[in-house]
Amino acid sequence: MIEISKPDFDEVVRLHWHRIFQFVHRSVRDPDLAADLTQDCFWRAYKSWPGFRGDSSVHTWLRRIALNVIRTFARKKALQLLRCAVSIEAINESHIKDQVSSCPEANAVRQDAVRAVWKAAKRVSPKQRLALRLRFVDELDISEIAATMDVSEGSIKVHLSRAVRSIRATLQSHA
């Protein structure tokens, strides 16, 4: 039997802590709580590390654990799953900086448009909102989103399609 070499868990933490923290922080929008939940995620991963088979990437596996930690926290606190839609403040500043022009008016129009999209996104289902966030904020591909949400790739495509259609209709009705 061929044995798959896995990196030392300390190396896994070093390589993935920041991105998992960002993922959790965008969900809970509280840095202290995000740090606690990220710690819980890595604690659960550490306990499960010997059984990690490598069916997915380590990062996808950690993201799935983080999502479960977030869901567990939400249930314990009687919060809706992922109750907070992604807002303009939650978008990574680097995404905004890449699109900033030298014209303040153009920047203001762009920011208003982004705010309108995320406001419209509050009207879609939590699963659709999560799929949107993973695709357009975290920039995951369809297979990574499917692995993170533990659903088929086809289901992810349907969630994204319906969410985009709903957001488009909302924006057109307000135009």
Image (cartoon, helix red, strand yellow):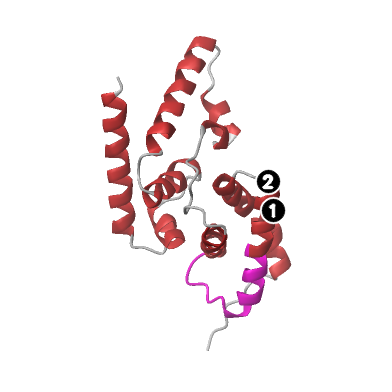
Relative to residue 7, is residue 145 depicted above or below? above
Q: In this view, does 170 lie to the left or right of 122?
A: left
Figure quadrant of the C terminus: top left
Q: Which mark, by number, is residue 173?
A: none
Q: Are marks 2 and 1 in contact (CB under 8 Å)?
A: yes
SS for tag 2? helix
Measuring 34% from the left and 54% from the top, which residue is drawn there? 156
Tell me, yes or no, whether the highlighted magenta stretch contains residue 43: yes
| Nearest the eye: 148 or 1 | 148
Residue type marked 2: Pro
Tell me, yes or no, whether the highlighted magenta stretch contains residue 4: no
Q: Name the residue under label 1.
A: 35
Give the image location of residue 85, x and y in percent.
47, 41
- Residue 170 visible in image: yes
Q: Name the residue under label 2.
A: 31
Give the image location of residue 152, x and y in percent.
33, 62
| Nearest the eye: 99 or 117 | 117
Give the image location of residue 146, x and y in percent.
39, 59
Measuring 54% from the left and 21% from the top, which residue is drawn there? 100
SS for tag 1? helix
Query: Which quadrant of the structure image shows residue 164?
Result: top left
Mark 2: few/some/many CA within 10 Å (<14, 14-19, 20+)? some
- Residue 103 visible in image: no
Look at the magenta stretch and give its main secondary structure: helix
Q: In this view, does 8 lie to the left or right of 173?
A: right
Residue type marked 1: Ala
Measuring 40% from the left and 31% from the top, which residue is drawn there? 117
Mark 1: few/some/many CA within 10 Å (<14, 14-19, 20+)? some
Give the image location of residue 174, x and y in percent.
30, 23
Q: Give the range drawn in magenta.
A: 41-57
| Nearest the eye: 145 or 111 | 111
